[in-house]
Image (cartoon, rainbow, N blue to C red):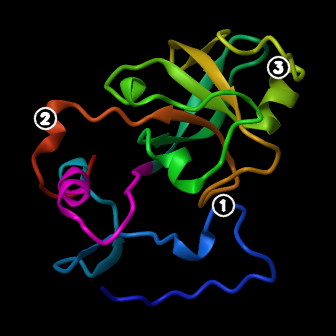
Amino acid sequence: LEFRRVLFRSKPLPYKDPERLVVVWEHNIPRDRKNNVVSPGNFIHWREMQQSFDDLAAVGTTRVTMTGDGEPEETWTQAVSASFFPLLGVEPALGRIFTAEEDRPNNRAAVISDRIWRRRFSADPNILSRPVTINGNAYTVVGVMPPGFSYLDRRVDLWLPMGFSAEHRTPRGRWH
């Protein structure tokens, strides 16, 4: 492994055992891309075969459109594997995180940020089990993260289960 980036902070990262966390990327040698997106098949293979880490979690960031409860808005989301929140040791402020059973294709559970809960949903304590529409599909809010929670991108307001399908199990190039 090649480590090239160093992060210096005056205070520790807000996760359990932050000194034990690492981010793993693929190195695309033909294109000389050192932070290449990992394909689902490669991630699954690494997770099954590795013996160096307590666990591995997958995360991918993209934009989605949220509608209902006010004007439509684009927001940043992270698709995450069910191991993501437990690996970071972060609990939601309200509700729960994803279960392993929810980490499957087309699951419609969602965890939202404290920021969007307060701004878009007026900090409604009855947000849990309430439907929200994301890219035209109804999702059920199962949790609200604590104020200020983020991982790699502070713009993210929504987390959805990654949900790899059987076809994703084949190791190959990057995920499209």
> Measured from the top left, where is residue 169 in percent x and y?
14, 43
CA neighbours of label 1 inside 10 A, class few (<14), some (14 to 19), many (20+): some
> Measured from the top left, where is residue 172 in percent x and y?
12, 55
Residue under circle 3?
121
CA neighbours of label 2 inside 10 A, class few (<14), some (14 to 19), many (20+): few
Above or below 60: residue 73 = above
> Measured from the top left, where is residue 104 in percent x and y?
33, 26
Residue at figure coordinates x 89%, y 21% from the top left: 122
> Measured from the top left, where is residue 84 in percent x and y?
49, 47
Residue at figure coordinates x 80%, y 77% from the top left: 11
Residue under circle 1?
15
Give how far apart the Cα atoms at labels 2 and 3 are.
37 Å
Tell me whether circle 2 and circle 3 mark residues in contact (CB < 8 Å).
no
First to last magenta residue range: 42-59
Which quadrant, please, contains the N terminus? bottom left
User: Residue 167: which numbered mark, if any?
Assistant: 2
CA neighbours of label 3 inside 10 A, class few (<14), some (14 to 19), many (20+): some
Q: What element carries label 1?
A: loop
Residue 28 belongs to the span the image colors magenta: no
Of residues 71 and 94, the one nearer the viewer is 94
Give how far apart the Cα atoms at labels 3 and 1 are.
26 Å
Q: What residue type is labelled 3?
A: Phe
Q: Which amino acid does label 1 sit on?
A: Tyr
Q: Is mark 2 on a helix, strand or loop?
A: helix
Give how far apart the Cα atoms at labels 1 and 2 are.
33 Å
Residue at figure coordinates x 29%, y 59% from the top left: 38
Q: What residue type is labelled 2?
A: Glu
Q: In which quarter of the image is residue 35?
A: bottom left
Residue 57 belongs to the span the image colors magenta: yes
